[in-house]
Image (spheres, coloured by chain):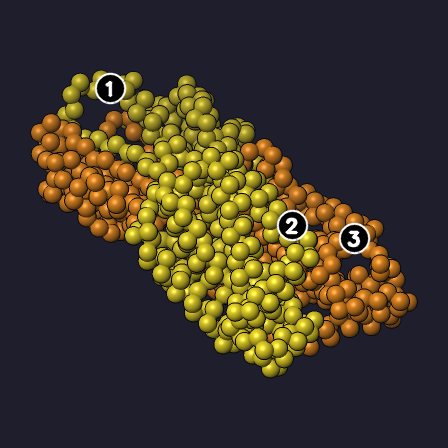
């Protein structure tokens, strides 16, 4: 125990003597948490629209004013032809082209049907999907308007109609920040924890101070614990700062218990630091450690369910998310903060992360050799 | 010039003698591009839903079956009471609850109207909106079928054409994005660490007293990393064309040229980072902390930049990968030429010059 205290003291001194790192660990996450949640927004506004109107009728005019008035689209230009409109898409001046054919109004009135072409630049995933859906919805609404103009619908339904009501729980105002702030906080914790741990032991290897530890009576377990505990505490400080920012700046008050968030955070940090330390025991140089931990970090973050839905991933990728502590913590943070889930609701995630943590830390202890 | 070549050779020796690092740097981007190219998609499908069927009649069952059969949903569980909805959501993994009123079919056939309630878990707003819309469409289809041949008058039928990416593959968007991200991080980190390493292990002094000019010294440091990053670009492109089936529609030469330009920008950024950090740890932390999230969030491939508030839209302009992402999309996917991307290229040239000037002016010949 005393030996552990000694090595802890050494580690803490080392950390506090490097103000640059300390600043990065404490200040950068706060700044990033203040800025980036504003960037994360899948709500698509300002889809750039180019209209090719071959009809120039009162209906086509009406339609154009309806779609530009919807708030989702920004009319950038009227193109004389479809090929000209495609050029606008090529140069990114338009995301979506709507072509109204000649005789649009006449066909609609005389032949009861007419058509319209929507062409979407499908390279921009989100924008293409949503832009297309919005446009189709607006066309449907417009269609209903016209039908009402021409057909006197009977007062009572003659057709069976299913009335669909929909409601959004936990976030009725559809505030993206509620969704992103916990996610970005977890991302920041991930970056800090895995990197600090990954670089630490290998740094001692590289500058040669590990020799001194190797000849000391400190055991392998004490050595790893001595590395783990200071970073773990620093991670908890970052988590606290993050929660304070979320509370004060974004007004996010967890519905569930704060204690549970901390409990999960502790286990999460333990696991991530374990992975970092394991990388550190394998690596020979800091370069190796950085690149491997960068690889693991990107894997955890991008397959963490924050940016793209896990359900849509292929089966093998879903399996990766089962050993991804970041995916668990993002899910759990959201559950506790927004839905008020209790321990019983998150116990599977909790024990999974704990199990991963024990696994990686044990491996790190075993893999650390006191002789070179 | 001869000295310069000797220095470049020294750097190459450094790199090639550390086999493990070399292997990591070559293999990592390949694995990442394969993983992310297949796994990332903005499409939302296979969402778990729960059903509270108070009717349990022919119609409600038919709708549930349709929901389950569609690629968007997977009926995960049945719940029995209103109170259980809360429990179902709280234990996670359910995106939507569909509630049928008692006597659904009866009321549909006799009073011509019946109610379905969709409750979405909006803690993830994007998914909530999308799954609600999918469910509405599926129920709407069922209703249409129930109504038989009834043809509404004055129908406008929109035809939707997906340009460049008819199958809506996620890889078309994520390959350029992940490529920009990997390249800038690897190139900037490698370079900054290599220089700071010399400071840290005190070999810098030896170099500073050598007759090589500082400018040439810095360039000799950068050349091998530019070369390695180009190797990464080639492997990434081979993998994306052959395994992910993302085509290169434009000129390969142009694409490689732009990649070279972007790598130079990234390497100069790395040089700049190395001038104001003292240890490798600092350099790596700084590169990762300042590059990872901005590239991911403001690079344009995850979140549409147009929807961001103005200050962030302005900020996104200083993220180099945003420009490279635009270039790669234009050249690789849309098959456009230089006239479409010259502006973006100029921005990258400007950024490189800025980083280089800053690092040269801060580079000290004397150690304190």
| Residue B173 appears in the figure | no
Question: Seen from this angle, which residue lies furthest right?
Answer: B211
Name the image quarter holding residue B26: bottom right
Q: Measure the C-alpha gap from mark 3 to mark 1.
A: 73 Å
Task: Identify the subunit bearing mark 3.
Answer: B
Tell me the residue that label 2 is attached to.
A23
> Which of the two labelled residues, at mark 1 and mark 2, occupies the earlier sequence position?
2
Point 25% across, 45% down: residue: B87
Colour displayed for chain B in the image of the structure: orange
Give coordinates of residue B267: x percent, y percent.
71, 57
Query: Which of A142 and B46 lies nearest the eye of the viewer?
Result: B46
Q: Secondary structure at mark 1?
A: loop
- Confirm whether circles 3 and 2 share one chain: no
| Residue B56 appears in the figure | yes
Image position of B183 with respect to B73: above or below? below
Q: Measure the C-alpha gap from mark 1 to mark 2.
A: 69 Å
Mark 3 in CB contact with mark 2 (< 8 angstroms): no
Neighbourhood count class around disc 1 (C-alpha, 10 Å): few under 14, some 14–19, many 20 upward:
few
Image position of B163 with respect to A82: above or below? below
Point 46% across, 30% down: residue: A72
Q: Which chain is yellow?
A: A
Tell me the residue that label 3 is attached to.
B359
Query: Which of A105 and B143 lies nearest the eye of the viewer?
Result: B143
Q: Secondary structure at mark 3?
A: helix
Comparing marks 3 and 2, which lies closer to the viewer? 2
Task: Identify the subunit bearing mark 2.
Answer: A
Residue A304 appears left or right of B143: right
Task: Identify the subunit bearing mark 1.
Answer: A
Looking at the rendered image, the quarter that the C terminus of chain B falls into is: bottom right
Image position of A273 with respect to A71: above or below? below
Give coordinates of residue A311: x percent, y percent.
36, 53
Tell me the residue that label 1 is attached to.
A151
């Amino acid at each position: 125990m005393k030996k552990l205290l000694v090595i802890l003291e050494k580690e803490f001194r080392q950390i506090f003597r490097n103000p640059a790192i300390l600043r990065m660990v404490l200040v950068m996450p706060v700044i990033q948490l203040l800025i980036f949640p504003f960037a994360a927004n899948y709500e698509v506004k300002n889809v750039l629209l180019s209209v090719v109107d071959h009809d120039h009728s009162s209906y086509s005019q009406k339609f154009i004013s309806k779609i530009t008035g919807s708030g989702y689209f920004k009319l950038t230009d009227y193109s004389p032809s479809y090929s000209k409109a495609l050029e606008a898409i090529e140069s990114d001046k338009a995301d979506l082209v709507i072509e109204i054919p000649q005789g649009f109004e006449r066909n609609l009135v005389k032949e009861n049907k007419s058509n319209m072409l929507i062409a979407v630049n499908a390279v921009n995933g989100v924008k293409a999907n949503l832009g297309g859906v919005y446009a189709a919805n607006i066309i449907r609404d417009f269609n209903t308007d016209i039908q009402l103009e021409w057909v006197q619908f009977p007062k009572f339904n003659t057709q069976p109609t299913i009335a669909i009501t929909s409601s959004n729980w936990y976030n009725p105002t559809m505030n993206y920040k509620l969704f992103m702030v916990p996610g970005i906080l977890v991302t920041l914790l991930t970056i800090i924890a895995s990197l600090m741990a990954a670089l630490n032991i290998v740094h001692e290897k590289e500058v040669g101070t590990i020799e001194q530890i190797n000849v000391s009576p400190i055991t392998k377990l004490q050595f790893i614990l001595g590395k783990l505990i200071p970073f773990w505490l620093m991670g908890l400080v970052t988590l606290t700062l993050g929660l304070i920012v979320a509370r004060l700046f974004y007004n996010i008050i967890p519905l569930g218990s704060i204690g549970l968030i901390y409990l999960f955070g502790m286990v999460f940090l333990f696991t991530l630091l374990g992975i970092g330390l394991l990388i550190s025991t394998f690596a020979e140089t800091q370069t190796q450690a950085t690149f491997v931990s960068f690889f693991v970090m990107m894997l955890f973050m991008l397959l963490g369910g924050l940016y793209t839905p896990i359900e849509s991933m292929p089966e093998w990728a879903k399996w990766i998310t089962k050993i991804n502590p970041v995916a668990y913590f993002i899910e759990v943070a959201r559950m506790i903060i927004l839905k008020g889930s209790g321990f019983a609701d998150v116990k599977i995630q909790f024990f999974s992360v704990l199990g991963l943590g024990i696994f990686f830390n044990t491996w790190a202890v075993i893999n650390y050799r006191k002789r070179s | 010039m001869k000295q310069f070549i000797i220095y470049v050779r020294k750097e190459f020796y450094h790199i090639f003698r550390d086999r493990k690092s070399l292997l990591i740097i070559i293999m990592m981007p390949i694995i990442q591009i394969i993983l992310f190219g297949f796994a990332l998609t903005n499409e939302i499908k296979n969402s778990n839903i729960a059903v509270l069927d108070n009717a349990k009649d022919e119609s409600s069952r038919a709708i549930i079956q349709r929901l389950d059969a569609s690629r968007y949903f997977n009926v995960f569980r049945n719940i029995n009471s209103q109170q259980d909805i809360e429990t179902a959501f709280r234990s996670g993994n359910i995106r939507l609850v569909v509630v049928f009123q008692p006597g659904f079919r009866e009321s549909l056939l006799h009073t011509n109207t019946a109610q379905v309630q969709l409750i979405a878990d909006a803690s993830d707003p994007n998914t909530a909106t999308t799954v609600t819309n999918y469910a509405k469409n599926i129920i709407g289809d069922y209703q249409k079928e129930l109504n038989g041949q009834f043809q509404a008058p004055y129908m406008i039928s929109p035809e939707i054409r997906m340009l460049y990416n008819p199958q809506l593959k996620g890889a078309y968007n994520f390959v350029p994005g992940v490529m920009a991200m990997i390249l800038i991080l690897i190139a900037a980190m490698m370079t900054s660490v290599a220089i700071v390493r010399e400071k840290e292990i005190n070999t810098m002094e030896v170099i500073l007293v050598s007759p090589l000019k500082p400018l040439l010294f810095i360039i000799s440091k950068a050349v091998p990393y530019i070369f390695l990053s180009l190797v990464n670009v080639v492997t990434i492109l081979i993998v994306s064309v052959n395994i992910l089936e993302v085509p290169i529609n434009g000129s390969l030469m142009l694409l490689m040229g732009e990649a070279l330009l972007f790598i130079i920008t990234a390497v100069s950024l790395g040089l700049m980072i190395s001038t104001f950090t003292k240890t490798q740890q600092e350099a790596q932390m700084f590169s990762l902390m300042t590059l990872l999230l901005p590239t991911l969030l403001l690079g344009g491939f995850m979140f549409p930049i147009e929807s961001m508030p103005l200050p962030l839209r302005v900020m996104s302009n200083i993220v180099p990968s945003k420009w490279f992402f635009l270039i790669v999309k234009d050249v690789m996917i849309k098959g456009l030429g230089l006239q479409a991307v010259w502006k973006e290229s100029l921005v990258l040239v400007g950024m490189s010059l800025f980083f280089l000037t800053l690092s040269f002016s801060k580079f000290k010949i004397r150690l304190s």
